[in-house]
Image: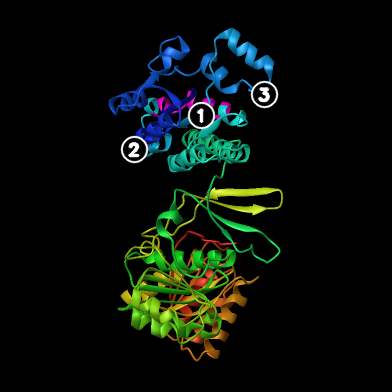
């Protein structure tokens, strides 16, 4: 008779799984809570100490760290010397190991009690997983509740091949590596401000992309904490590597205004249109005015539900991607007329942000790692008025919008907003005055009047030339971090032109 060792923290499906194992000729060995639930459910199981010939001890800290367990898992069935020694030592083979680990993540999410956290670091579980994975030639290692049916199918239909077990071996080492990484990152976060000697970035694969940034590159999407599994539903088309990067920028901006009816249009990860209005249809219509040329083939993020009326308006031009909180069936029918458009929704009334706490970028030979950047709730509200003239209520709203968009736009950048809609944007320039002038030129080309607009810069203006250009265009309100050695010149220029000028005293570079 074959033997299966089953010891799980997640008890979902374990009873049925073990009943199926028994039907397929397995004897079940189990521990603690798993043993209890199995026996209560009518599964004839052997408690672990009958195998180890040693009681669980030290409040359960030691129960499976035993040669009868690891010898049973690890000895090679293809070497007579191993078989002879196992017989000599009284070690019986264990042919399947089903283990999922102590709930460390759930523990750190619910408590800050370090003693409780320490007790939820699994020791015996990872050891058994690694032993079984190492001996995958003879042992099936199961670490995922979702694989129970697959394992039973393999046992019952002659699919339990070495290749099958190899797949589970890889998954097992991924499982223990992710677990240890989570613990190490947590300890560094708690004791080393999140920046220890090692930093682990672990994601779970969601899907392959058709290719990477270019057709000769392979690509895939990985997620943290099931963000995409829970909040990203494909309605039409297939998300490419570039689509995912572009929609990320648009979603961050559109979702950055809470419950507001915000629409962001982006191209190559940067905004080319944005507006907040009474309705999403109005917001999209105003956002499109900023740069309809760049919007062609772009990404639209809608912080709400796309209905039939909005879909019909969107369908007037070619859009590559639409992502929203929801897209109604009627709207999807409208979009079905366009073959190339891709539709995604989050299954919620509004767009959902993961709000990752950390951020990193790959550089040649490694990566740079940092705390994630975000605009504080009261950053604009508490900005320091440094000019003689103050902004009015709507002006403050426009400055807030411009400032938040600027924080999520490639540096050097400037953003002009009027009546809650972006009317000009310059981004990714090597100088701030170039960004200002580029934005104003495009606004002029589009026939947009920036008179009375609010101007935001994500970093200080090093010279007054950007203020001069803004004043010539009719800008009345400016917000920037301040901090230049020429701040007084900037302030004097604002006063000279009768502008309001605010310093947030926080820089938001995005490189």
Q: Which residue bears the numbered disc 2?
A: 110
Circle number at residue 96 = 1
Looking at the image, tell me whether mark 3 or mark 1 is earlier in sequence order.
Answer: 3
Disc 3, disc 1: CB below 8 Å?
A: no
Residue 159 horizontal side relative to residue 416, left or right: right
Q: Residue at x 63, y 63 (%)?
A: 211
Q: Magenta stretch: dominant SS?
A: helix
Say few, some or many: other residues with alpha carbon within 10 Å of mark 3 (under 14 / 14 to 19 / 20 or more): few
Magenta-highlighted residues: 117-131
142, 309: nearer the viewer: 142
420, 14: nearer the viewer: 14
Distance from Cα at disc 2 to Cα at disc 3: 47 Å
Q: Position of residue 454 (x, y in %)?
A: 43, 77
| On screen, residue 25 above or below 161 | above
Distance from Cα at disc 2 to Cα at disc 1: 33 Å
Per the image, label 3 sits on a secondary structure element best described as: loop
Say few, some or many: other residues with alpha carbon within 10 Å of mark 1 (under 14 / 14 to 19 / 20 or more): many
Per the image, label 2 sits on a secondary structure element best described as: helix
- Residue 343 found in image quarter: bottom left
Circle number at residue 78 = 3
Q: Position of residue 224 (x, y in %)?
A: 48, 49
Residue 350 horizontal side relative to residue 468, left or right: left
Looking at the image, tell me whether mark 2 or mark 1 is earlier in sequence order.
Answer: 1
In this orientation, does residue 420 appear?
A: no
Q: Position of residue 245 (x, y in %)?
A: 55, 64
């Amino acid at each position: 008779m074959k033997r299966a060792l089953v010891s799980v923290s997640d008890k979902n499906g374990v009873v049925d799984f073990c009943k199926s194992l028994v039907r397929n000729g397995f004897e079940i060995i189990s521990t603690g809570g798993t043993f209890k639930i199995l026996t209560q459910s009518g599964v004839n199981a052997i408690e672990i100490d009958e195998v180890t010939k040693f009681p669980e001890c030290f409040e359960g800290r030691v129960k499976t760290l035993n040669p009868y367990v690891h010898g049973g898992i690890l000895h090679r069935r293809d070497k007579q010397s191993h078989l002879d020694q196992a017989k000599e030592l009284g070690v019986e083979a264990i042919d399947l190991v089903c283990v999922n680990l102590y709930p460390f993540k759930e523990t750190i999410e619910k408590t800050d009690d370090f003693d409780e956290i320490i007790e939820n670091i699994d020791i015996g579980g990872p050891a058994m997983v690694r032993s079984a994975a190492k001996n995958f030639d003879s042992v099936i290692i199961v670490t995922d509740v979702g694989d129970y049916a697959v394992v039973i199918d393999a046992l019952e239909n002659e699919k339990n091949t070495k290749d099958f077990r190899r797949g589970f071996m890889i998954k097992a080492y991924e499982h223990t590596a992710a677990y240890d990484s989570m613990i190490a990152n947590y300890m560094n976060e708690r004791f080393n401000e999140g920046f220890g000697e090692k930093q682990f970035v672990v994601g779970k694969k969601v899907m392959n992309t058709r290719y990477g940034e270019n057709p000769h590159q392979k690509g895939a999407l990985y997620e943290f904490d099931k963000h995409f599994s829970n909040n990203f539903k494909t309605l039409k088309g297939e998300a490419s590597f570039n689509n995912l990067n572009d929609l990320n920028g648009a979603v961050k901006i559109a979702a950055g205004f809470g419950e507001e009816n915000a629409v962001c249009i982006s191209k190559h990860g940067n905004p080319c249109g944005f507006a907040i209005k009474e309705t999403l249809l109005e917001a999209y219509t105003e956002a499109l005015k900023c740069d309809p040329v760049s919007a062609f083939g772009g990404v639209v993020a809608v912080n709400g539900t796309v209905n039939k009326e909005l879909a019909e308006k969107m369908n007037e031009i070619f859009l590559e991607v639409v992502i929203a909180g929801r897209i109604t069936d009627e709207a999807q029918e409208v979009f079905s007329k366009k073959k190339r458009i891709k539709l995604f929704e989050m299954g919620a009334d509004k767009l959902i942000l993961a709000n990752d706490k950390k951020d990193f970028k790959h550089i040649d030979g490694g990566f740079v790692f940092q705390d994630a950047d975000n605009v504080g709730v009261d950053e604009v509200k508490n900005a320091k008025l440094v000019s003689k003239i103050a902004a009015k209520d709507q002006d403050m709203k426009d400055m807030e919008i411009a400032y938040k968009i600027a924080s999520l736009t490639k540096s050097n950048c400037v953003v002009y907003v009027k009546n809650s809609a972006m009317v000009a944007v310059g981004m990714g320039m090597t100088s701030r005055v170039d960004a200002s002038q580029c934005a104003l030129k495009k606004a002029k080309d589009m026939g947009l009047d920036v008179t009375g607009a609010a101007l935001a810069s994500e970093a200080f203006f090093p010279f007054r030339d950007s203020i001069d250009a803004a004043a010539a265009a009719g800008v009345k309100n400016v917000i920037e971090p301040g901090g230049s050695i020429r701040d007084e010149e900037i302030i004097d220029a604002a006063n000279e032109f009768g502008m309001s000028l605010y310093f947030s005293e926080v820089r938001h570079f995005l490189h």
